[in-house]
Amino acid sequence: MKHKIIIFFTIGIFLYLIDIGLNSESKDIYISDQEILSLVSAWKSQVGREPTDDEISRIINNLVDEEILYREALLLGLDNEDRIIKRRLAQKISFLKQESISISPSNTEILNFYNKNKDKYFVDPSYSFTHYYFSSENNSVDRSKVGMDQIKNNIEVNSDSFFLGKNFAAEDIQNIDSNFGNNFSSNFLDAPLNKWVGPYRSSFGHHILFITDFQPGFYLDIEDVLNQVEVDLLQIKRDKAVQDFLNKIRSIPSNSSISVFVKSNQHSALLKSIEVSLDCLNNSPISK
């Protein structure tokens, strides 16, 4: 495989030398064998077989074409004011700064971080329950009160179908609020088990609840989340490395400090608000 690539690479260099002899302007394109091998390996993974000589030639030609088009785009200034390119470059330098923090934290650091951030490793209380639902589009207030009376009198309840179903198992507070909205989980805090209670209002109407099980919240032991704590600590260190780099760039001498301006003659009301924010940024201790 390497022998084939070297042959095509040599042919490409030969053709390039002929071209450069006819054109005094340098158009050097340097492609490493590792880059080509990486592309060939990716091709093999996608197709499931070794590429033929002709296919290797097309892989190399596509790589050269891409580089030529990239350079022409730069000459035309197509990278200017392109938010996607700016974001991608910002992501790459952020990634490089993050990767500079590669040493695993010590056990002492991990333990200290866990103790200072135990709330991150707290498992919320959970409830199992069933409910009767009364849609807000069909007089949910009165119908839910009637439904409660029907339960007390052992009469079949005339309720509506809830789009997430009737029975819920081991739902934590966050999920309950996400599913029912309107801080609905607050209705569970002092509610008794195995007894119909309500009606309670949600974002969709009213509900009568029957809670069958409650599991209190608890802190996970560090032994159970050791790997996650290490990942979280390392990520915070990496984020700090990026922020420190930004602060270092911003905290350059005042005669060459970074200022931010907006170039626009439109949307004056919005622009005025933006300029106020930029003024605060430009005059902040970090930007001076």
Image (tube, helix red, strand yellow):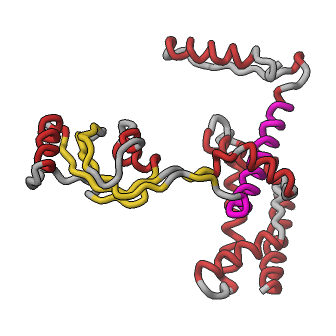
Counting every numbered tag in the picture gives 0
Q: Indicate the quadrant containing the N terminus: top left, top right, bottom left or bottom right.
A: bottom right
109 sits to left or right of 205: right
Judge whether 104 appears above or below 98 on screen.
below
Residue drawn at 76 percent across, 50 percent down? 233
218 sits to left or right of 170: right
Question: What is the x, y in percent for residue 150?
Answer: 11, 48
Residue 246 within the segment the image draws in magenta: yes
162 sits to left or right of 155: right
Residue drawn at 49 percent across, 51 percent down? 125
Residue drawn at 38 percent across, 44 percent down? 188
Question: What is the x, y in percent for residue 245?
Answer: 83, 37
Q: Nearer the viewer, residue 136 or 2?
A: 136
What is the magenta range?
Answer: 222-248
Question: What is the x, y in percent for residue 142?
Answer: 13, 35
27 sits to left or right of 118: right
Asked if residue 153 can be seen in this view, the reply is yes
Q: Indicate the quadrant containing the C terminus: top left, top right, bottom left or bottom right.
A: top right
Residue 226 within the segment the image draws in magenta: yes
Question: What is the x, y in percent for residue 115?
Answer: 75, 47
Q: Nearer the viewer, residue 117 or 266?
A: 117
Q: Nearer the viewer, residue 79 or 277?
A: 277
Judge whether 168 appears above or below 196 on screen.
below
Asked if residue 93 can be seen in this view, the reply is no
Residue drawn at 59 percent across, 53 percent down? 218
Judge whether 92 appears above or below 260 on screen.
below
- Prevailing SS of the magenta stretch: helix
Q: Nearer the viewer, residue 142 or 229?
A: 142
